[in-house]
Amino acid sequence: EAGVTVLLYEAGEALRFHEIAIRTGVRGVLRVMAALGMLRRLPAPIAQPPRALSSYWVRAPIGGILQSQLRLGSSIVDEAPLGLITDPFGEVEEPIRARRGGLLIGMSKLPIVNRGDALFHIAQLARGGDYSITVAELEQQLEADPVLDEDYR
């Protein structure tokens, strides 16, 4: 409304500080500031990041207890099983599947879900890129990154 350009970065788990997500965000802000001429030095990219063309959420078709073994950064194929929702007694089981493949970029950590809750956020990636770097490798590189040092100017 005020005509001010804003860039929003969302990462990590709700109501939690996630160091890797924070480091990634700070690194991104510094790169934007350098591109705008606000900083002299541009932090080198750690790895070629995947480029998402679109994304979608998989929502809970029923309420119950969500069980999933997936981790953020998992590669998802079309129709892949994502998890299972059961009733408290295990009598009703509802499998949760991906509509399309992609990269798991967000997920609910809450075990109790209601019908319609957002459970899994899957990004569709641009073709032709090498996205072989794993989330664990990226975290290792970010932890060793001096980007938050006082010497950074």
Image (tube, rainbow, N blue to C red):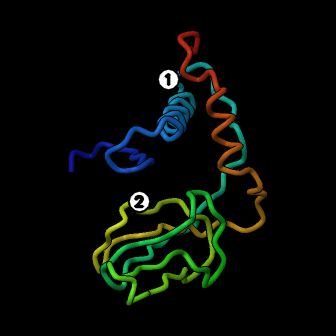
Single out the residue that lies furthest toward the bottom: 92
* Residue located at (54% from left, 83% from top): 99
Q: Is residue 142 above or below residue 51?
A: above
Q: Nearer the viewer, residue 114 or 126?
A: 114
- Say the numbered circle drawn on residue 38: 1
- Say the numbered circle drawn on residue 56: none
Task: Tell me the amino acid under the disc marked 2.
Answer: Lys
* Residue located at (67% from left, 42% from top): 138
* 126 displayed left or right of 28: right
Q: Nearer the viewer, mark 2 or mark 1?
A: 2
Q: Position of residue 84 (x, y in %)?
A: 47, 79
Q: Nearer the viewer, residue 102 or 68?
A: 68
Going from N to C along the chain, the mark reached first, 2 or 1, is 1
Q: Quadrant of residue 111?
A: bottom left
* 113 displayed left or right of 48: left
> Badge 2 local density, few (<14 within 10 Å), some, or many (20+)?
some
Q: Is residue 68 above or below residue 79?
A: above
Which element carries disc 1, helix, strand or loop? Answer: loop
* Residue located at (41% from left, 59% from top): 109
Report which residue position mark 2 lands on: 109
